[in-house]
Structure formats: C-alpha cells, structure tokens
C-alpha cells in the first residue's frame, strides 16, 4: 500500500487486536513505519491481558473476533486503559454495530478494506484528541491550585497573556478593569483573580449594572435605610457591605449613570459608602473589579463618563481577546465544554466530527466563547435526547464561506467605524435575519434579552439604525 501521509515522529504505543493474520501483520508493518510502537494480539482475551501488562495510547480493535467479540472488549477497556483511544475496525454490513461502539466510548471506526492513509489519519486524529484531553486535565489541575471552579481554558499566546496578568495582579489590592467583547469571558477572569487572591475565602459578588434600572442600582450597591423610599420597610445592606473582605465585580460599568458615578468614585478613593437615606458614612473593605465591552476613553471624551472615575478604575487593565484571535484554542475549549455538559446531562460525551471542527475553525464566532459554549451545549442536549454519536446540528450555513461578520468588518474598515458602530450594525443584521424575533436574536448574539432591549433602546435614542 502506498502511503501519501508524512510519517509522524512519535513514540505513541498502539495495540492491534485482529484475528486475521495477514491483516494483523500488515497493520504492524504500516504502523511501525509511521514511528509507532506496536503490539498485536489475535483475540480479545489476549488483548485484555496485554492491556493489563502495558500502557497503550491507541487500541485498534476488530469488531468480529473469535470468542470474546470486539464490543465486549470495548466495554472492558476503560478499567484497564482509561486514557486509551479505541478505534474499531468493521467489515461491510456491521456499520450499525460500529456506530453503537462509538456510543459506548470508541473514538471512531474504519471500514474494511481501508487504505493506509485512512488508517494513519484516523489514528492521528485520535492522538490529537488524546493530547487535547491530557492538556485539559493539566489545565484543570493547574486551576485547582487557584480554585477548583475556575478554568481559564486555552494555550494560545493571547490567552496565556491574560493568565499571566491574572497571576500578577491577584495578590495585590489593585482595582482591575477587564475589557473585551461580549462573550469573551470577562467575569471568568474576574473570578479567577478573586480565587487566586488572599480574599478567596470571602464573597465574590457580581452585578450587571446594565440589567438593573438606575434608581434600583444605587440601593443594590449601597443599601438603604428604612423609609428611604416607597417600599423600604427596613434597613438593608448593599452589595459593598455584603461583600466585606471579598470582591465586588461590576459588569458593564460603562452603563452607570452620571449621577451614580461620583458615589462609586468615593468608594474607590475613601473606602466609604453612604446608604440611600443614610446620614453616616459606612467604612467598607472590598476589592473592586469592573468590566466593559465599550471604549470608556471614548465615553470620557464625549462627556458620558467621568475622567477621574475612569483613571481610578483603570489601575490594572486586562483585555480579553475575542475567540477569532485565539482560534487555536477552539479544539481545547470544545472538548472542555463537551466534558462539562456531558457530565451535567449524565451521558457519554458525543463525538465532534473532524468536518464539524474544520467548519468551527473557519467560523467567525461573533458571540465568542459564549457562542461556542452554547453551540456545544445544544449538541450535547440533542445527543442526550436520542441523537447520533456525533454532534447532531450544524453551524450557520455560511460558516465555510466568507461569513456575514467578515463582510461587516470589511465595511467597518472602509467607513472607519468604531467597535460600538460595528456591534450595532451586527445586532441589526442578526435581528433582520431572524425577522426581529428578539429572543432568538439574543441567543445567537450570546446576550440576555434584557441587555438586547437596553441596547436597542439606546440605539433608538441616538436615532441610529446603521453607522454612516
């Protein structure tokens, strides 16, 4: 058989379980030529004994074996080789059995007769996924060092810079401003800072400033005294007091009204608050982390934001990159979310076909990591409800082409739009594509409906449909 695939420099170990002597010897030769260390057995029982005596990366397993068949062997592999990837070999007419094998945990299957290239590429993909799983395990282990619930998943230079900044700022008391597009994981960064700090055993209190009306936001943050307003039937502590010793995370800080901004400035300058209706300042002990997806400097220049507050917030800036700038993290993130939601729904993780992953790598991901997570969760839900062993849905139909988002970028560059202009135009295009069904649009955009309504209300007040 002629091989057109470059040989891999690898020390991966492969166990071949195949009763046909001619094919077994051929598999040994082909895989050895690729640089793999190969062991082979002629029966399922001998294969299991080999697994008890050595550690394998790949198990190449025939379905039709004498005595104990391949499906029986497959069910016993995890107890002996928990990290191994199993590739099933199946003859014509047993494809249904092979698909069932994938549901039982096999990585993939190949139909006999198969080419050398098909075999080598399948094993290569199995090893790549195995590497991702191992990397994910290392990330989880590292994350447990700063908090078991925090995983900054990724190995790209862009996200590693963020991880390094988190490690640098966490031990200090510095105020942090986290910036980045919607869905990039700004709250996750804030939680990671809190968990890696000496305040980790104290509360982490998040609040979305855009989700609460101004007249209620002040009470939520600063608390109120009995009788301060209609409905204030008792004294109430606000978030700043409730988080004593811990961290307060103010998301979408750019939406805070001009009336409330000086009160927040006092928190940062003096560590004091005044409850609504109160007369005595109350000392507080909190660390403040704020986040925004807008350009605060631009809002300062337009008079919509206090300059002194901006500089107080921007002591230690961290910019979270969009997913399109860290696409090498997509496979690892996908596996992370597959594991997460498979555990949640108590099912075996479905497979992510290579064709789907290729389209995911080409897709623009306007909703960033949140959109990717939603995509994977929907696939797991479909699988849990009786779908195939692979993810049973597709990306937007234009994902393989130059997508709508990319064309918007071209237009933005030509017209010199700001990020806010670009976001507004994309929101309107998504709304038009779903015939202004706001719930559906919010899901595609990766934001909640309240945030979408707020943005639309702001666009209406600005008299803007599309940036010109």
Image (cartoon, rainbow, N blue to C red):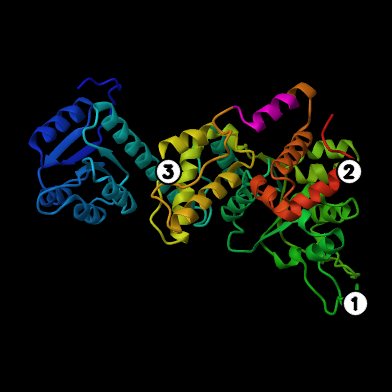
Which one is earlier in the sequence, the residue at label 3 or at label 2? 2
The quarter of the rendered structure image containing the C terminus is top right
> How would you classify the magenta stretch by its main secondary structure?
helix
Q: Above or below — where is 230 with respect to 129?
A: below
Q: Above or below — where is 4 with respect to 203?
A: above
- Res 422 visible: yes
Disc 2 target residue: 304
Disc 3 target residue: 352
SS assignment at label 2: loop
Q: CA distance from mark 3 to mark 1?
A: 58 Å
Residue that sits furthest to the bottom in the current view: 233
Which one is earlier in the sequence, the residue at label 1 or at label 2? 1
Disc 1 target residue: 227
At x 35%, y 35%, the residue is: 125
Task: Check if residue 409 falls in the magenta segment.
Answer: yes
Which quadrant of the figure has residue 372? top right
Q: Nearer the viewer, residue 235 or 370?
A: 370
- Say few, some or many: other residues with alpha carbon within 10 Å of mark 2 (under 14 / 14 to 19 / 20 or more): some
- Dot in front, 3 or 1: 3
Q: Tell whether 50 sits left or right of 232.
A: left
SS assignment at label 1: loop
């Amino acid at each position: 058989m002629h091989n057109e695939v470059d040989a891999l420099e690898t020390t991966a170990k492969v166990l071949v379980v195949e009763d046909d002597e001619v094919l077994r010897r051929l598999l040994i030769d082909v895989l050895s030529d690729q640089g793999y260390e190969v062991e082979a057995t002629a029966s399922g029982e001998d294969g299991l004994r080999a697994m008890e005596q050595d550690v394998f990366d790949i198990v190449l397993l025939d379905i039709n074996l004498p005595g104990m068949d391949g499906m029986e062997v497959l069910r016993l592999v995890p107890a002996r080789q928990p990290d191994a990837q199993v590739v099933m070999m199946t003859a014509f007419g047993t494809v249904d059995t092979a698909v069932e094998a994938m549901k039982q945990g096999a990585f993939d299957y190949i139909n006999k007769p198969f080419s050398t290239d098909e075999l080598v590429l399948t094993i290569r993909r199995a090893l790549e996924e195995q590497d991702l799983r191992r990397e994910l395990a290392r990330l989880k282990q590292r994350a447990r060092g700063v908090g078991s619930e925090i995983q900054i998943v990724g190995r790209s230079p862009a996200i590693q810079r963020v991880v390094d900044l988190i490690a640098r700022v966490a031990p200090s008391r510095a105020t942090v401003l986290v910036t980045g597009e919607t869905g990039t994981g700004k709250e996750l960064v804030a939680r990671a800072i809190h968990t890696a700090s000496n305040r980790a055993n104290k509360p982490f209190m998040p609040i979305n400033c855009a989700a609460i009306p101004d007249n209620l936001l002040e009470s939520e943050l600063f608390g109120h005294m009995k009788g301060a307003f209609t409905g204030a039937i008792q004294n109430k502590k606000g978030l700043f007091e409730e988080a004593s010793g811990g961290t307060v995370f103010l998301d979408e800080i750019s939406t805070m009204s001009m009336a409330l901004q000086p009160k927040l400035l006092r928190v940062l300058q003096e560590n004091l608050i005044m409850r609504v209706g109160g007369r005595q300042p109350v000392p507080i002990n909190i660390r403040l982390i704020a986040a925004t997806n807008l350009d605060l400097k631009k809002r300062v220049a337009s008079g919509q934001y206090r300059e002194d507050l901006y500089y107080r917030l921007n002591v230690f800036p961290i910019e979270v990159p969009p997913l399109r700038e860290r696409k090498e993290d997509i496979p690892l993130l996908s596996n992370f979310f597959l594991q997460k939601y498979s555990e949640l729904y108590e099912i075996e993780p479905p497979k992510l076909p290579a064709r789907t992953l290729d389209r995911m790598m080409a897709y623009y991901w306007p909703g960033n990591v949140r959109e990717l997570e939603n995509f994977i969760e929907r696939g797991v839900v479909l699988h849990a409800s009786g779908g195939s062993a692979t993810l049973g849905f597709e990306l937007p139909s234009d994902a393989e082409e130059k997508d709508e988002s990319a064309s918007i970028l071209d237009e933005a560059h030509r017209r010199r739009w700001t990020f806010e202009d670009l976001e507004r135009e994309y929101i309107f295009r998504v709304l038009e594509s779903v015939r202004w069904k706001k719930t559906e649009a919010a899901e595609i955009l990766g934001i909640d409906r309240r945030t979408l309504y707020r943005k639309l209300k702001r666009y209406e007040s600005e008299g803007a449909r599309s940036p010109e």
